[in-house]
Image: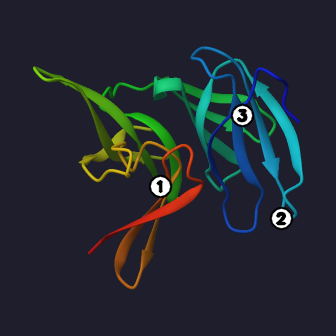
């Protein structure tokens, strides 16, 4: 369903029993993306193209999608057919969002990584942010210090938060080559 250039799947999301949405982009900034949907049988359908690298996408549940570009420098609200309904610059430069998830009709969870330079070199820092679904401003953000076996932040790859027995559980894709899911619990 994709061509040879667009090989990099970003974050993906679905709401309820709806299709699973995934952005598959070229592996470079300011490139192109094909937005695809997968049904319950995992049959993939190319829905539309975007003239930017979308690294994360989620279904807002109101007939629109939220997406973030490479490095999350731009935020998009897209129709299910690909019309750009809103595009805004991200004023935050703390974290480059890698994945997004709808938490409620009003809030999106965005996770990702950033870099901090010190005298001893460049250090990766993970982060979580809560975004407003309506104007995409950051409501709250926190650093994440938990790491995977490789030393990468747990927010480096695909990420999903859920509540189990009054505890928040963070699920993430562990490193790039393990194909395993890690779980971190916050009580």
Q: Is residue 123 above or below residue 18?
A: above
- The residues tagged by marks 1 and 3 sit, at their Cα atoms, a distance apart of 26 Å
- Could you tell which of marks 2 and 3 lies nearer the N-terminus? 3
Q: Is residue 156 above or below residue 163?
A: above
Colour scheme of the picture = rainbow
Choose between 153 and 114: the one closer to the eye: 153
Count the numbered circles shown: 3
Residue 58 appears in the rendering? yes
Residue 171, how many percent across, how many down? 47, 62
Q: Are marks 2 and 3 in contact (CB under 8 Å)?
A: no
Q: Which residue is mark 3?
A: 24
Residue 56, how many percent across, how many down? 57, 39
Q: Left or right: 81 with respect to 10?
A: right
Q: Quadrant of residue 179?
A: bottom right
Q: Are marks 1 and 3 in contact (CB under 8 Å)?
A: no
For the point 56% across and 52% down, the residue is: 178
């Amino acid at each position: 369903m994709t061509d040879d250039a667009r090989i990099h799947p970003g974050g993906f999301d679905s709401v309820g029993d709806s299709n699973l949405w995934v952005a598959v982009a070229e592996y470079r900034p300011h490139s192109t993306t094909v937005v695809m949907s997968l049904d319950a049988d995992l049959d993939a359908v190319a829905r539309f193209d975007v003239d930017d690298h979308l690294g994360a996408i989620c279904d807002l549940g109101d007939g629109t999608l939220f997406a973030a570009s490479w490095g999350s420098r731009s935020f998009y609200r897209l129709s299910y057919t690909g019309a750009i309904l809103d595009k805004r610059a991200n004023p935050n430069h703390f974290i480059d969002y890698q994945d997004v998830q709808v938490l409620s009709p009003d809030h999106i969870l965005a996770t990702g990584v950033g870099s901090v330079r010190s005298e001893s070199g460049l250090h990766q820092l993970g982060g979580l942010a809560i975004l407003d679904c309506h104007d995409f401003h950051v409501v709250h953000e926190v650093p994440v210090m938990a790491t995977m076996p490789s030393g990468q932040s747990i927010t480096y790859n695909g990420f999903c938060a859920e509540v189990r027995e009054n505890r928040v559980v963070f699920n993430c894709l562990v490193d790039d080559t393990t194909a395993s899911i890690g779980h971190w619990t916050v009580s």
